[in-house]
Image (spheres, rainbow, N blue to C red):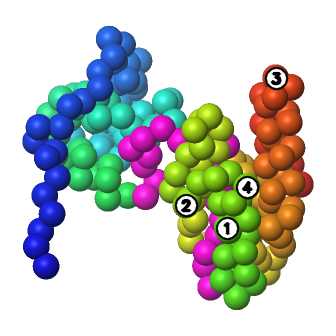
Amino acid sequence: MAWIVKPSGTMGIERRDEPYLTQSMRDRLTREVLPRYETTHAALLPALHMIQHEHGWVPAQAMLEVASFLKLEPAEVYDTASFYEEYWLKPRGKYLVSICRSIACEFAGHERVTQAVKDRLGIDVGETTDDGLFTLIELECLGSCGTAPAALVNESLHENATPEGLVRTIDEICRAEAAGSSAGAPHH
């Protein structure tokens, strides 16, 4: 099988005037994070977490800013950010629908729940709706094996999740969004 090479060396990076790695973040990294490590490379994960916590994802411009600040090669930052599933390298939806795919949830029928959400939102796993409201992912264990299948909608845990129940939750969110409410996902 031949290697498929991506043109990352010539890839264009969308930039904005305002930095993602703000001065207050730099100050906090300098004051609180860097002193805990022998090398700046060791502070890379906390720096990426800081960016993602503030912006909801880690844009390419932010990776360049982190690389410059920590005196690392941009490729090292990208390799790290793309290796760990917890970092988002593209914007995600306002509501993250996470369906557990662990063995307990698999036996309890998580596939039906995932398929119902895919059908309702018109997206596949790993995609975001065009309106930017929902991103669907599957992940490993949510620690709710006794009440499988389990799902999270943002921080709201749905135990014994059913296709109908999760679609109903999505419909409730859509109605609330249409009414102008940004109170977040309903808790069940």
Q: Residue 31, can we see it?
A: no
Above or below residue 24? Residue 71 is below
Q: Which quarter shows the C terminus?
A: bottom right
Viewer-closest of 116 and 91: 116
Q: Are marks 2 and 1 in contact (CB under 8 Å)?
A: yes
Viewer-closest of 68 and 6: 6
User: Which disc number belongs to residue 120?
Assistant: 4
Dominant SS in magenta = loop
Q: Position of residue 110 (x, y in %)?
A: 70, 76
Q: Position of residue 158 (x, y in %)?
A: 80, 62
The magenta stretch spans residue 95: yes
User: Which disc number belongs to residue 125?
Assistant: 2
Residue drawn 64% across the image and 53% down it: 122
Q: Earlier in the sequence, mark 4 or mark 2?
A: 4
User: Which disc number belongs to residue 180?
Assistant: 3
Which residue occupies the extreme top position in the image? 17
Q: Are marks 3 and 1 in contact (CB under 8 Å)?
A: no
Identify the image quadrant of residue 101. Answer: bottom right
- Which residues make up the magenta segment? 85-103
Left or right, residue 40 beside residue 82: left
Q: Mark 4: which amino acid?
A: Arg
Identify the image quadrant of residue 69. Answer: top left
Q: Earlier in the sequence, mark 2 or mark 1?
A: 1
User: Which disc number belongs to residue 114?
Assistant: 1
Which structural element holds mark 4?
A: helix
Q: Earlier in the sequence, mark 3 or mark 2?
A: 2
Which structural element holds mark 3?
A: loop
